[in-house]
Image (cartoon, rainbow, N blue to C red):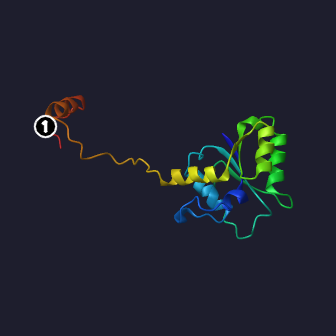
Amino acid sequence: MRLLVDASNVLHVTGVLPPALALSEPSELAQLILRSRYSQADVTLVCDGSRPGMQKLGQFGLIQLHWTGATTADSVIEMLLQKSSHARSYTVVSNDRAVQANARHRGASVLSSDRFLSYLARDANRTRQTNTPLRDVHLDEETTQRWMKELGLNEDTP
């Protein structure tokens, strides 16, 4: 899956994320994406303007931060789709109707910023399975004896 995300558009959506997950910069959005169902996707966060000097940067897996400079994120997204020979493989994340219409025209899928954020919030709140084995499993005597035999254990083995 390939995502083109209008980062500024997503960051300005309010009322979707709980306060504990509030985002103020693209690097925070990237970190949230890495904890979501999109963690293995090829993600490009298209950010308006030049990279601020204080912007926190780090390793974001397959996530690229693309700063637009003097042009707009909308124009860059349109240009990236236009240049791609596989525009249908993209999902464009934006609430901007012109961006959505252009993406659909090029064959890309569209996901609203609100829905995208709700997926990120849901994924961040889901419980992760741990690697800690369950120690309080109670087996009946017959099952216990069968497992002990299978594992080559006897009653005296601690």
Q: Nearer the viewer, residue 61 or 67?
A: 67
* Label 1, residues with CA under 10 Å away: few <14, some 14-19, many ≥20: few
58 above or below 112?
below
> How far from the left and from the top, in percent, is residue 21?
55, 62
Percent from the top left, x then y, of residue 85? 81, 35
Residue at image coords 40%, 48%: 130
Residue lying furthest right in this view? 70
Tell me the quadrant of the picture where the C terminus can be found: top left
Q: Which residue is mark 1?
A: 155
Q: Is residue 89 left or right of residue 50?
A: left
Using residue 17 as the reference point, say whether residue 137 is left or right of it.
left
* Residue at the image point whose x is 74% and y is 70% from the top: 53
**Total of numbered circles in the picture?**
1
Residue 57 position by quadrant: bottom right
- Which image quarter is the N terminus in? top right
State the residue at coordinates (60%, 46%): 38
Tell me the element at label 1.
loop
Residue 12 percent location from the top left of the image: 68, 62
**Mark 1: amino acid:** Glu
The spot of residue 149 in percent (x, y) is 20, 29
Left/right placement of residue 107 relative to residue 29 reads right
Q: Is residue 13 above or below residue 104?
A: below
Going 79% across and 44% down the picture, which residue do you hit? 101
Answer above or below: position of 87 versus 33.
above
Which of the 4 quarters of the picture holds residue 106?
top right
